[in-house]
Amino acid sequence: MASNLLSVVYASAPSGQVLLPTLEFSSDGFEERIRVVEGFEDIRVTLPGGDSAVFEGCAMKVALPKHDTSGQQAIQLGLVNLMGEVSRIIDQTHKAGYPVRMTYRLYLSTNLDEPAELPMQMIVKDVTMQGGMAKITASYNDMIGTAWPRERYTSQFSPGLIYL
């Protein structure tokens, strides 16, 4: 990872180096992956694993989750979606019962061969349209909504329960 170079960029903001946040949406409910990058130009990057992919330029605003001990870690983002494509696909996929996965990767404009930090993988929880903007909430650590114990003791899991 290019974390040393990323630390320099955060500390001194050298000219000629731009942070390029990327989002990738995927699901079993739709065939193609939706890939966008903040900015107005498409870019070709190397994904972890060696594959190359093109990310479409898009106006977006990303609010990363806080690094704390709260139970819900969520990312908020606004994606200009004038044609409604992203919102429509995600809504249809949710209605069909498939989870939509979102991967956030940060690249440096001077090094598109690898992400500058480890990717964050999340599940899309909510999508709303407001004007031409798709507002998306995704979570990667839903401790509040996690069942404990994980296995539910039902009559299918433990057939003897029907006699209680």
Image (cartoon, helix red, strand yellow):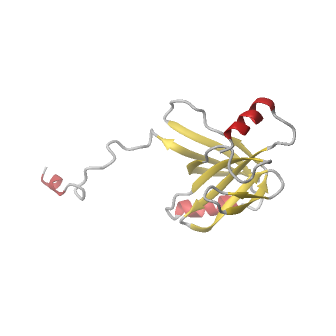
Instruction: Specify the quadrant of the image occupied by residue 93.
Output: bottom right
Nearer to me, 135 or 158: 158
Residue 144 x %, y %: 45, 38
Residue 133 x %, y %: 74, 51
Residue 25 x %, y %: 63, 57
Q: Left or right: where does residue 141 sit relative to residue 63?
A: left
Q: For the view shown, which residue lies furthest in the right direction?
A: 15
The number of numbered discs placed on residues in the rendered structure image is 0
Q: For the view shown, which residue lies furthest in the bottom direction?
A: 31
Is residue 107 positioned above or below 53 on the image? above
Q: For the view shown, which residue lies furthest in the left direction?
A: 163
Q: Left or right: where does residue 107 sit relative to residue 102?
A: right
Residue 154 x %, y %: 25, 53
Nearer to me, 15 or 63: 15
Residue in the image at 61% along x and 45% along y: 118
Residue in the image at 53% along x and 65% along y: 28
Instruction: Specify the quadrant of the image occupied by residue 139.
Output: top right
Residue in the image at 45% along x and 39% along y: 143
Instruction: Specify the quadrant of the image occupied by residue 12.
Output: top right
Location of the N terminus by quadrant is top right
Is residue 85 positioned above or below 150 on the image? below
